[in-house]
Image (cartoon, rainbow, N blue to C red):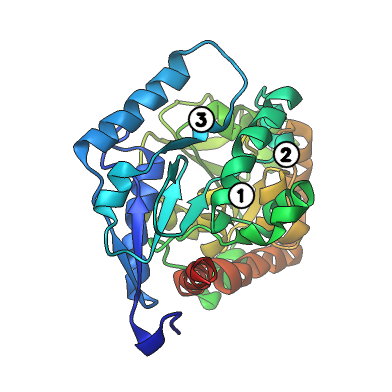
């Protein structure tokens, strides 16, 4: 499958600085990981941000973090495209995250959009600030050849907000090539053995990810049920276990170790207060976990509106009730975990998402 005559790969310049405040910046790491699209579809991912360009973006980021709060405008999202134009010479299009490079000869796919207003509100962002985001980004939506959003729900929300630009918003999930899914046989085997229930939580930002809600939810369970749970927590924060709960604390783990933990878990808990997407939810689904997660616009779609997981939100009582249901009804838990794994294969495995990226790039070129 190729969008260019003769089957030549689409040449995509990835506009992401080499270094952006923190060497382990998640956005930086993700954008560089897109190089592995080449393993699945006919694309050539090109990188080449200069040190000066990276320093400029870092200073802009620091300025925004340190400046007094003010409404956003298009200048906050746009920047000179001169450094990009020099590095992207010969590319067919430019894929840019966060800041939009202006004045380029190539079409630009902008990987940035206004996040779920409900989720932002839960994080303390006012409706006025959300409106400022929409107003600031609209002129750049109009300049973009396409705007990449990770879910159909986000595309629909933006299309309803900007009907004259509806075709610009293309749902294309995040590319997660590091995931190795569990087999169907392994999934059925682990859910067939549940004298004790293996539950896991993974989150560096423990409060934002809802670790306190997880512990409160488990503490609210009947003592007999609480004693059946083995909880593993991967987080720098050391939690205090409710009485009767067996808890293992893991300060840090590699992605491979996290997947192994999930593959041994019956249930994955992450009732985040704020979550822009949820890579960890996808990882848990791929490992055959029954997932209890946030009830945001994006996460409801990831969890198939409840068919492939329990979207309950940041509410300890709702988390407790969902966990109790999964403990009491093993067939229902198995069906949910099986649906989660099937959804991973249908929507989020690397081969599928790579084809979605190729289609996105082809639309931008057209």
Q: Is residue 77 above or below residue 156?
A: above
Question: Label 2's element?
Answer: loop
Q: Which of the two residues, 205 or 287, is positioned nearer the viewer here?
A: 205
Query: Is label 1 or label 2 in front?
Result: 1
Can the viewer see residue 281 in this picture? yes
Callouts 2 and 3 close, C-beta under 8 Å: no
Image mark for residue 313: 2
Q: Quadrant of the N terminus?
A: bottom left
> Secondary structure under badge 3?
helix
Extreme-left residue of the structure: 51
Q: Position of residue 283 (x, y in %)?
A: 50, 56
Write down the residue under mark 1.
142
**First-in-chain label (1 vs 2):** 1
The answer to whether the residue labelled 1 contacts the one labelled 2, judged by CB atoms less than 8 Å apart, is no
Q: What SS does tag 1 mark?
A: helix
**Percent x, y of residue 9:** 34, 77
Q: Is residue 229 left or right of residue 364?
A: right
Q: Quadrant of residue 332?
A: bottom right
- What residue is shown with label 3? 75
Q: Earlier in the sequence, mark 2 or mark 3?
A: 3
Mark 1 vs mark 3, CA separation in Å: 15 Å
Residue 133, labelled with which disc? none
């Amino acid at each position: 499958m190729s969008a260019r005559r003769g089957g030549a790969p689409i040449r995509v310049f990835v506009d992401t600085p080499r270094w952006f405040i923190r060497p382990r910046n998640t956005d930086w790491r993700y954008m560089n990981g897109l190089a592995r699209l080449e393993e699945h579809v006919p694309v050539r991912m090109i990188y080449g941000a200069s040190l000066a360009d990276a320093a400029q973006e870092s200073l802009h980021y620091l300025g925004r973090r340190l400046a007094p709060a003010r409404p956003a405008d298009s200048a906050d999202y746009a920047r000179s495209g001169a450094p990009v134009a020099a590095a992207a010479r010969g590319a067919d299009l430019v894929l840019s995250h966060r800041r939009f490079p202006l004045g380029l000869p190539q079409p630009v796919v902008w990987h940035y959009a206004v996040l779920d207003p409900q989720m932002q509100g839960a994080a303390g962002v006012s409706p006025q600030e959300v409106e400022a985001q929409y107003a600031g980004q609209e002129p750049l939506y109009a300049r973009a050849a396409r705007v990449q959003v990770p879910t159909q729900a986000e595309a629909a929300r933006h299309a309803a907000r900007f009907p004259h630009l509806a075709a610009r918003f293309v749902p294309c999930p995040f590319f997660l090539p590091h995931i190795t899914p569990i087999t169907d046989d392994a999934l059925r085997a682990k859910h067939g053995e549940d004298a004790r229930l293996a539950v896991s939580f993974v989150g560096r930002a423990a409060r934002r990810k809802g670790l306190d809600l997880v512990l409160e939810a488990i503490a609210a369970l009947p003592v007999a049920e609480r004693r059946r749970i083995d909880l593993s927590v991967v987080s720098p924060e050391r939690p205090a276990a409710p009485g009767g709960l067996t808890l293992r604390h893991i300060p840090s783990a590699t992605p491979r170790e996290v997947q192994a933990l999930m593959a041994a878990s019956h249930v994955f808990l992450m009732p985040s207060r704020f979550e822009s997407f949820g890579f960890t939810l996808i990882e848990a689904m791929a490992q055959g976990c029954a997932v209890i997660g946030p009830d945001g616009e994006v996460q409801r779609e990831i969890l198939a509106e409840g068919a492939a997981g329990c979207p309950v939100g940041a509410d300890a009582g709702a988390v407790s009730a969902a966990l109790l249901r999964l403990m009491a009804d093993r067939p229902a838990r198995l069906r949910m975990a099986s649906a989660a794994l099937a959804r991973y294969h249908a929507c989020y495995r690397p081969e599928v998402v790579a084809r979605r990226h190729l289609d996105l790039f082809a639309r931008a070129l057209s």
